[in-house]
Image: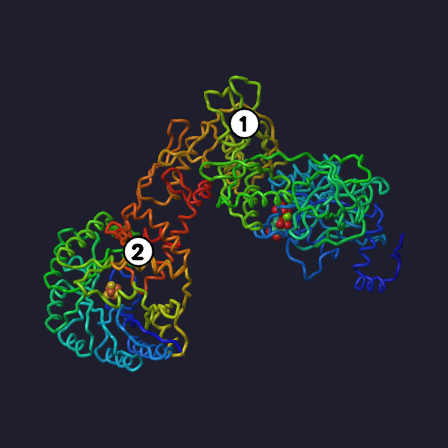
Amino acid sequence: MQRYDYSVNLWMKLLLYFCFTCIEIQNIAYICAMKLIRNFCVIAHIDHGKSTLSDRLLEYTQTIAERDMQDQALDDMDLERERGITIKSHAIQMYYHHDDGQVYIYNMIDTPGHVDFSYEVSRSIAACEGALLLVDASQGIQAQTISNLFMAIDHNLEIIPVLNKVDMESAMIEEVSDQIIDLIGCKREEILLASGKTGIGVHDILRAIVDRIPAPKGDPEAPLQALIFDSVFNSFRGVIVYFRLINGIIRKNDKVRFFHTGKEYLADEVGILQLNMVEKPELQAGNVGYLITGIKVSKEIKVGDTVILAKYPNTDEIKGFEEVKPMVFAGIYPIDNDDFEDLRDSLEKLQLNDASLTFEPESSVALGFGFRCGFLGMLHLDIIQERLSREFNQDVITTVPNVMYHAFLNKNPTEKIVINTPNDLPDPTLLHHVEEPYIHAQVITKPEYIGSIMSLCMDKRGILTRQTYLTTSRVELTFEMPLAEIVFDFYDKLKSISRGYASFDYQPLDYRKSDLVRLDIKLNGDNVDALSALVHRTKAEELGRKICVKLKDLLPRQQFLIAIQAAIGAKIIARETLSAMRKDVTAKCYGGDISRKRKLLEKQKEGKKKMRQIGNVEVPQKAFLEVLKLND
Amino acid sequence: MISFSGGLYLHIPFCKQACHYCNFHFATSLVYKEKLVKALIKEIEITAKKFSNPELKTIYFGGGSPSLLTLDELALILDKICQQFNVDGVEEVTLEANPDDLTRDYLKGLKALGIQRLSIGIQSFHEEDLKWMNRAHDSHQAMYCVPLAQDIGFDALSIDLIFGYPLLTDEKYIYNLNKVNKWQVPHISAYSLTVEEKTPLSKGIKKGLDKLPDEDAALRQFTMTHEILEDYGYEHYEISNYSKPGMHAIHNSNYWLGVPYIGIGPAAHSYYSGKRRWNIANNQQYIRKIESGEDPSESEIITSQITYDELILTRLRTKWGVNLSDIETIGAKYSAHFREKVQELIRKGIVQKSDENYKLTFKGMLMADHWTAELFY
Ligand SMILES: Nc1nc2c(ncn2[C@@H]2O[C@H](COP(=O)(O)OP(=O)(O)OP(=O)(O)O)[C@@H](O)[C@H]2O)c(=O)[nH]1
Ligand code: SF4
Ligand SMILES: [Mg+2]
């Protein structure tokens, strides 16, 4: 093995740095002993500054050249940049020149903070030995601070607590430090003070990573075992797999095997993840990198699977992370029925990059062929829709979301039937009972909002089980409530009644008996199956009325009167009437009118093309898209 | 250089006051009138020079209110037209006029200048209607301008009427129709009141000060116009136009028949050399552009699809209808599309077919725009 002498004098170092950066880095990565690797992730509640602090770490280690630097550099999706949130975990490698003269390899993963993306966090955690736990000094500990921390502790990660945004005037350094000490039982001196904005504390953090986070353990001599923690689809290269090497070495041109699928491929390319992918001849145990095998079909890859060498087919898999369970289901349909196959293709590719997305084909009378998709929450659904549109040029219609119910029939009340679409709910006469999923919900807030948050949760059929003062000014409320109730407008309501001073987290709890009904929407007596919803009986009328009112707004007037009704079975529970179209007598049309009129009529005609026929009523696509936005 | 043979439209963008329903381009201040006339004259020259020996078939002064031009101003414009265009074949010279401008002297002057045809914006003979519309003329002027014009020798008259507004009862409308018929004017345009965006009328409706036109009354009055005027020997040759046999408006009909036209003046539209153009709808900017030699227009290329859509849009509404062979010249896919789509409309009694010619039935005319859109490609 080649050795590199680090004790050269300063100017030599600089010269080498500027002239031979590539060679240097390549060599380091190639020969680096495991003790020089640190794998860590950055975790926190949403907006506590993970991506901004990551920028500073990348800057300090000169991983990203100054001219390429931009805010939240790792948030490389347009959608992330526009919304200012991280959606995907991002792995990146950097080099840290320690005072001890050694150069360390840091594999950092910036994670998202929103509860809908906690699966991203869990997978990142599985690839690391340590975590930077950030807490916004002006906000204090929030719901996802706690849930992400617990996830990291469960995986035995070394936690480095970082009090972030200390530059802010509203920073409460003492108070929040107390909260952190309370929460993780660390010493005050162990909490690092930092600001991603000004760069305070960055050096301390980089040092602490070497000192506190253990180097990965693994055996480079053992047969290859690499955990796939993420993947992306690239239209030129095919599927790109991101992995964490646990044992062994992976080399270019190795014949590899994916444990679960049992399929074998040639490792066309392996390398490390910097801002771009950097190819390497081989990677060793402990490191994080990527693998390209020329796989074009997304089905052949499963995040969580283990890569082994084909010549050692008996190598064990690594217990990765639990498979994610979708919380919310909705139908996704192509606007144009001819795009069904394209949509399937797009969903498959998206699934590669978002292992939490599930889907299977279904069909609707109103919308034709589409997919029933599972999501982790409403933001997730929203993001998938956006990504389909932006990355795959697929505009889609989404049906009313619902959670997964269990139905039991009279003829065999012990046999569970899984219901994740309204059309699957058996006829009430056959039903013995239905169960709906409950969650454990934690809300962290200020004491002055306890009252209004409690009444919101009661209104959502929640039961308060615990109230704990974390400090005198922070209280944690724990509820048991039906998952279905938080799917729709819970977040927005919580945010507005607490003026933003409430954070929320939840975990699945159990299934409980529920008085569930299917709410149908009818236009002139014809059922619009795409608008059917599963809802608790006590909420049916309100939802039905809202949908009818909204539809009245969204439907264009037609040649005849339209009755818009909401019904449970045969019983109508809400109704609106849309009067017939104005019969405007044709207007004049002279030389100056022709262009304008033509464009107007063309637009009308275009609008009509996008109509779906329900019985004798034409429903614009827009209606399906907009009807669910019941809050505005 | 390319040739031109067709109509000339001049937009005179001034009015005494703004009629409440009107969305034409005009200004109520006359300060720029002199400059504008100069600009029109310059634009006539610039445009004519684009063609080799351009010839005119019709000349039309529209607006706005062309009758606000002095006889001298009109003379300057007409002189320029005759100088720049071959006018030997001109079949019709029309000027839109408002009743309040039509004095005996003015009418005589128009006649002397060679204006052959007047299109008079009477709209209604009822005082309260004219007030509601905010017209500049009163019922007295409405009553007397026609006999006066006829007295001076204008036989080729066209009268504009409006129906479908809240104040107009059927009785009042029948009175208006009878009045026009009594003078035996050869041409009548009858328009259903449309509420255009950004007009005082639409603002009034939004504020609840005005009512929306009653759609049933409008339909009824449209039907009445058709029945009564056909009874009186007028031919319903286009949705809003009626004429005594052979007396249809040539210039306007040419819009529907696809004959090219040059538009001069702010907001004026043109159609020639496979393009539609429209001048900027702002008097000051128009003047500035013309003075500095800039092109005041924007344009759009007419693709085969637009040609088809426009053929349907303009022809179907006329008695001439649309010939399948005309559609076939645009492209086989359009005739196939038309043939397929039109079946349903024939079945519904919206379109009538004789040989390979298609036109709207009376029922189809009621909501021609709606049906037109159905036939678009
Ligand atoms: N004053 C101040 N503002 C900061 C600091 N760090 C981040 N911010 C701001 O806080 C907001 C959120 O920062 P991000 O870095 O995107 O937070 P995040 O934790 O990555 O957010 P998610 O990935 O969506 O969970 C942005 O507006 C940043 O500009 C800091 O140290 N000081
Ligand atoms: S006179 Fe004619 S152009 Fe002028 S405002 Fe009235 S309707 Fe409009
Ligand atoms: Mg982020």
Q: For disc 2, does the CB lie below 8 Å from ligand 2?
A: no
SS category of the residue bearing label 2: loop
Q: For disc 1, does the CB lie below 8 Å from ligand 1?
A: no
Mark 1 highlights which residue?
A: A436
Query: What chain letter is assigned to the residue under label 1?
Result: A
| Mark 2 Cα-neighbour bin, 10 Å: few <14, some 14–19, many ≥20 | few
From this viewpoint, is residue A205 visible? yes
SS category of the residue bearing label 1: strand
How was the colour assigned to the protein in this rendering?
Answer: rainbow
Tell me the amino acid under the disc marked 2: Glu
From this viewpoint, is residue A138 visible? no
Tell me the amino acid under the disc marked 1: Glu
Same chain, labels 2 and 1: no
In this orientation, which residue lies closer to the viewer: A612 or B122?
A612
Question: Residue at the location (32% across, 62% down)?
Answer: A593
Question: Residue at the location (84% across, 43% down)?
Answer: A220
In the displayed structure, B100 sits above or below A479; it is below
Mark 2 highlights which residue?
A: B356
Q: Position of residue A572 (x, y in %)?
A: 37, 29
Q: Position of residue B106 (x, y in %)?
A: 16, 75
In the picture, measured across the screen, residue B99 lies left or right of residue A76, that is: left
Dividing the picture into quadrants, the one containing residue A131 is top right
Query: What chain letter is assigned to the residue under label 2?
Result: B
How many marks the image carries: the answer is 2
In the picture, measured across the screen, residue A275 lies left or right of residue B191, that is: right
Question: Residue at the location (67% across, 58% down)?
Answer: A69
| Label 2 close to label 1 by CB (< 8 Å) | no
In this orientation, which residue lies closer to the viewer: A356 or A139?
A356
In the displayed structure, B309 sits above or below A549; it is below
Q: Position of residue A269 (x, y in %)?
A: 75, 50
